[in-house]
Image (cartoon, rainbow, N blue to C red):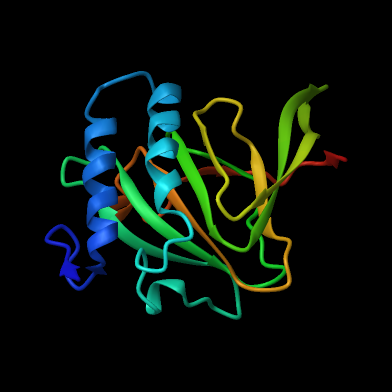
Amino acid sequence: MTTSAALPGVVRTERADELVAELRLAVGRGLPPDLTAHLAAECLLPHLGARDLLTGPQQTGDPECYRQHLLHAEPDGSFSLVALVWLPGQHTTVHDHLAWCATGVHLGEETERRYRLLPDGRTARLVATGDVVNPSGTVCGFAPPGDIHRVRNSGTGTAVSLHVYGADLARLGSSIRRVYHLPTEG
């Protein structure tokens, strides 16, 4: 295990260090956001489910809400790697993101409900466009716009997912751009 120079006190496993190096190469290609997200997702895939990827504390949840463990923030701000830990039934708000994102389910199962924003007179409303169940080993990548969703742990045990964001979460704290409190359909 090593301590991240960019994040004092954050301990990463050797395998997590390998993943960060792979992500650095993928992100460093300078491709458009949607392609970068898909390349980052491909980097996550071979590491998901590996017992030597995360430390015990990095897989610990919080009974109040899902928990984010920042594993790495690239010094130039080009990407961050986090582990999100979800206890059964925990979920996000309906939200979108500041930048591209790649996710991979490391343990358990998550359900994602995707939305589309529609004008409705002077306001707007959200329409659900689909539900996706993501079991362990599933990856995806996306980039704004059109990334409005809500994620929840739909299983009976703890779920852990890895997220790579094209933003500096050490500085920003979160990848969420906007939380939606609009009427929803579906």
Q: Quadrant of residue 10?
A: bottom left
Residue at 21% across, 45% down? 21
User: From where the camera sits, is residue 88 visible?
Assistant: yes
In front of the other: 118 or 65: 65
Q: Is the C terminus in the top left, top right, bottom left or bottom right quadrant?
A: top right
In front of the other: 50 or 89: 50
Q: Is the N terminus in the top left, top right, bottom left or bottom right quadrant?
A: bottom left
Eyeballing the image, is 110 above or below 65?
Answer: above
**Relative to 35, 158 lies left or right:** right
Residue furthest to the left in view is: 5
Residue at 29% across, 58% down? 16
**Relative to 7, 177 lies left or right:** right
Residue furthest to the top in view is: 32
Residue 63 horizontal/vertical position (percent): 60, 81
Q: Quadrant of residue 123?
A: top right
Residue 120 horizontal/vertical position (percent): 82, 24
**Relative to 51, 155 lies left or right:** right
Residue 7 horizontal/vertical position (percent): 19, 62
